[in-house]
Amino acid sequence: MVSVVRAARRQEVSIFDVVVGDVVVLKIGDVVPADGVFLDGHALQVDESSMTGEPHPVEVDAVKSPFLASGVKVVDGYGKMVVTAVGTDTAWGEMMRTITRENTDPTPLQERLEGLTSSIGKVGIAVAVLVFAVLTARHFTGSTRDEQGNALFDKRNVTFNAVFSGLVGIFQQAVTIIVVAIPEGLPLAVTLTLAFSMKRMVRENALVRRLSACETMGSVTAICTDKTGTLTLNQMKVTEFWVGADRPRSAAAVNGGVVRLLCQGAGLNTTGSVYKPDNVSPPEITGSPTEKALLSWAVEELAMDADALKRKCKVVRVEAFNSDKKRSGVMLRDAATGAVTAHWKGAAEMVLARCTVYVGADGAARELGVEQRRKLEQVINDMAAASLRCIAFAYKQVVDGGDSDNAKIDDEGLTLLGFVGLKDPCRPEVKSAIEACTKAGIAVKMVTGDNVLTARAIAKECGIISGNDDDAAGVVIEGHEFRAMSEQEQLAIVDNIRVMARSLPLDKLVLVQRLKQKGHVVAVTGDGTNDAPALKEADVGLSMGVQGTEVAKESSDIVILNDNFDTVVTATRWGRCVYNNIQKFIQFQLTVNVAALVINFVSAVTTGRMPLTTVQLLWVNLIMDTMGALALATDTPTKGLMRRPPIGRTAPLISNAMWRNLAAQAAYQVAVLLALQYRGFGGAGAGERANGTMIFNAFVLCQVFNEFNAREIERRNVFAGVHRNRMFLGIVAVTVALQVVMVELLTKFAGTERLGWGQWGACVGIAAVSWPIGWAVKCIPVPERPFHEIITARRRRRST
């Protein structure tokens, strides 16, 4: 229920009955039921972390921050607001509508697979129609004969049964060719490799929520990443300390009065806490990373006693951190003297602008003139350039005692106490991870809310930018500059951007949209609710599992369980492995299909019979599709995958190297097996059935040996790491065992004849030749430009 004022009467209504124009009464603990504008109240503060991801409460007033969003929680004070939007018209509703909108666009791999399957299907149907026509003509002209040389169709004795049975047999063979031609094992291979990769990725801290995201990661050309917690450890630590313009080596060199004021500012103007269970155990410090760092510094360096501090000073009033002011304030009353002091802490440039006096390490107060202000600003800039977050402490003695309940904490004419520089160190593995992305042709773009100096320094430290491209136009840009550009200007500069500082969530969304317009496959990391639209818009959204909000996780495709950028690179490597495994299976499957189609088509045209019978072709189709998919879909990523350029949206699924390998293996199999078809196996001493069995057996064993070749598309060593893939070795063994059963035990079913040791040896020898052929053919270089583009370009030149 919600308390509202209607017709000058206060009443309780259901949250679902709130309408535009209602005046809602808010108190601590309430969840704001709709979007609205603040009317009046006292010290109203709301937690907007569900919307923005920011942990600090936001103060609401009628002047600077009057807007309230649906779903935020009141954490302090009370007030009234007038409702301006409800339901799906609220900011929350608009965001949820954006992220729940289903993305029906096919992935790059799906687009390629659909095109490949369609092309293969057309070829298979065309070959089947030709075979049907040729076999029909030969059969009904009496040209097709059995093993004894007798015509299968007697033109002098034409009966319905003879015609019908002949057509059914021919139609059966034609349909079998279509079944063999269409790679129905391809969806199985895709599903298997995606499922296998998804299972293994969880072990490496990447939880895949959408299966197709695995393969899309393999095509990523740009990654837009956050800074805090992803590139950095999110473990703040004070590394620099200035008192006014002095940089003391330790707190011992600082006046005691200044140290006391700094302890008050750090220990009481905070949302964190210090708990010391006993005199032996170290204190337990809680709070945000920034607050924990400041409290740890105060305890360790300034020897702050938090309990004693609370006994000596009473907190009179608090002004929480505000994202606009970028500072927080507290008013303290000394328990002994009754003196009231206002303390401020926040972004150094904001606090310094409110100061008129500063103190040095000796405790002496000095006027803050123009020249001295410039020097202090330079200190702040130097810290930012060193990738430090600069926090300033200032105070002011309050003359009137702060007795008025409605009085604001005075923030004018402050006395500057000092600066501290907080370092959020880069993760140790980030630099090598970004270097791996660079070698892999992936552009990493850092999108952060930090100021431009800090953002540039962090980017240099991580390796996102170097000294050479730091001065290039558009490499480092601020969010407001990007927003001010037209769409065409944004498209012109988007490829150059490496760092976007002082950015808003909308900037990240627009950046993703412009990158996609330029043809990039984009991955985005995010942790806040306001990152949800960008996560949804990206080809792959990666949310943070530790710091990420539930809305961000629901909007993402992959959850990074340890918030580490290195895991993003791991997901990319697995995505490339998925794509590579699918390419391996396609190369293997097409070799089987091409060889089977050519052998049967040529034999049908020349002899009227297909050497591979319907049962044998279906057997080949079964074991090669299913077993081949299982064998080749379970290979793990290799280091070489991250040394290749990304596979863009328009890259062909079958590369030039695959065409080369496929053509060589298929040509060898067709040549040898057709030679067996026409000339027979001299040492067999058997008839046509034994020869057909030899062809069938040699064909299957050729595919078994070629499975090893298919493991590597470009590398010549096809046995590298094969001992680690037990699934592959097991499937090869099972395939060979099943083939032995088919030939030796199921002779009647398969239409085969048992073979002798010499015949088996000959079949194995024929199949084994595919290994040296595979090694030799990989020595032949192929152009990087796809064959179809080369052919198209030549045709255009000829036509002109």
Image: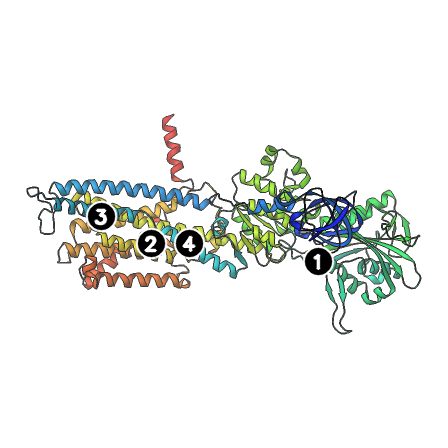
Is residue 145 among what the camera can see?
Answer: yes
Could you give the CA–CA distance between mark 3 and mark 1, rounded to whole angstroms?
A: 72 Å
Q: Do the residues labelled 3 and 2 touch (CB within 8 Å)?
A: no
Answer left or right for 562 relative to 312.
Answer: left
Q: Position of residue 309 (x, y in %)?
A: 84, 64
Q: How crowded is mark 2: few (under 14 residues within 10 Å), some or many (20 or more)?
A: many
Mark before the other along the chain sequence, 3 or 2: 3
Mark before the other along the chain sequence, 4 or 2: 4
Q: Please tell me the numbered disc located at residue 191.
A: 4
Q: Mark 3 points at which residue?
A: 172
Mark before the other along the chain sequence, 3 or 1: 3
**Amino acid beneath label 4:** Thr
The quadrant of the rendering that contains the C terminus is: top left
Could you give the CA–CA distance between mark 2 and mark 1, rounded to whole angstroms?
A: 54 Å
Q: Mark 2 points at which residue?
A: 625
Could you give the CA–CA distance between mark 3 and mark 2, rounded to whole angstroms?
A: 20 Å
Q: Are marks 3 and 1 in contact (CB under 8 Å)?
A: no
Mark before the other along the chain sequence, 4 or 3: 3
Q: Mark 1 points at which residue?
A: 289
Mark before the other along the chain sequence, 4 or 1: 4
Is residue 144 among what the camera can see?
Answer: no
